Image (cartoon, rainbow, N blue to C red):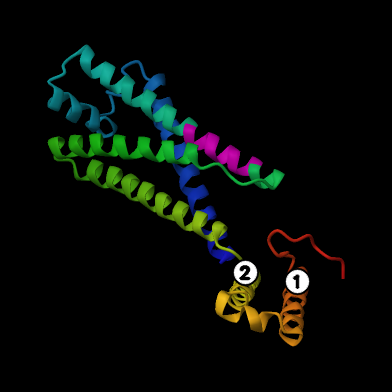
Amino acid sequence: MRWLGNLAAAAVMGIALYFAVCWAGEALRVFTSPTYGLDEFAESQEVFGIGRALALHGSGLFRAAAFLGAFRLVGALAFALYAAGRVRAFLLGKPCAYEMLEAALTLVVLLSFVTLLAAVLEESGSLLRANGLQLLLAAAAAIFNIIEREARAAPSPATAGTGALQASAGRGRRLLQSIPLRALWRLAPVRAVAAALDAFVRRWSDDLGAPVAGEPRHPA
């Protein structure tokens, strides 16, 4: 299942880079425009939709545009920090932290709901499609993130097999040591079989690199 985790990680990384670049570009457009981007009607319909919902006029529209630009800038920084942390964790061979990704996806969901409301008020199909796509990408990133974490946490087949073998051996020992079978356990042949079983389990665990819990590894 490791390949599935790698595939999910690549998908999440791609979505994070998309939002980092896209939102940073939109924030740059807002803060480099003397009218906070309101002169471009096709790209500022969400501001006018929010203004209609909140009854904003004049300077209120400029404040709304500046707020959306700052919101996207924070989201772009969050996605960029996640991507940088991901690369750093890969180079150092450490597990990746997912808190920054979860915070960034929360920002996407919040902004998507606001802009979808603006798209409905403005009756803009293009704005509805654009923000609906971003919401779907955020949902996909969340799903891929869950898939990756489950795949990373899943034990390998060899380790899982060793764990099952150790559990079975432990249940067998407890059964032999139970009250009805104590007399049988005192017999030398039965104890010899149990000792041989323990030795087999330890040797199997050593070969697979998973020692029996609570026991030191024995050299071959």
Above or below residue 103? Residue 145 is below
Q: Is residue 85 magenta?
A: yes
Residue 68 shown left or right of residue 13 in the figure: left
Q: Residue at x 87, y 66 (%)?
A: 219
Label 2 Cα crowd, 10 Å radius (few <14 / some 14-19 / many 20+): some
What stretch of residues is rendered in magenta? Answer: 78-88
Residue assigned mark 1 = 202
Residue 53, numbered label: none
Q: Secondary structure at mark 2?
A: helix
Q: Position of residue 2 (x, y in %)?
A: 59, 63
What amino acid type should be assigned to the residue bearing mark 1? Arg
Foreground residue, 11 or 151? 151
Q: Position of residue 155 (x, y in %)?
A: 59, 64
Q: Quadrant of residue 191?
A: bottom right
What amino acid type should be assigned to the residue bearing mark 2? Gly
Residue 177 shown left or right of residue 101 in the figure: right
Hey, which residue is sitting farthest right in the picture?
220
Hey, which residue is sitting farthest top in the picture?
59
Q: Position of residue 182 (x, y in %)?
A: 63, 78
Q: Is residue 150 magenta?
A: no
Helix, strand or loop for the magenta stretch, by majority: helix
Residue assigned mark 2 = 163
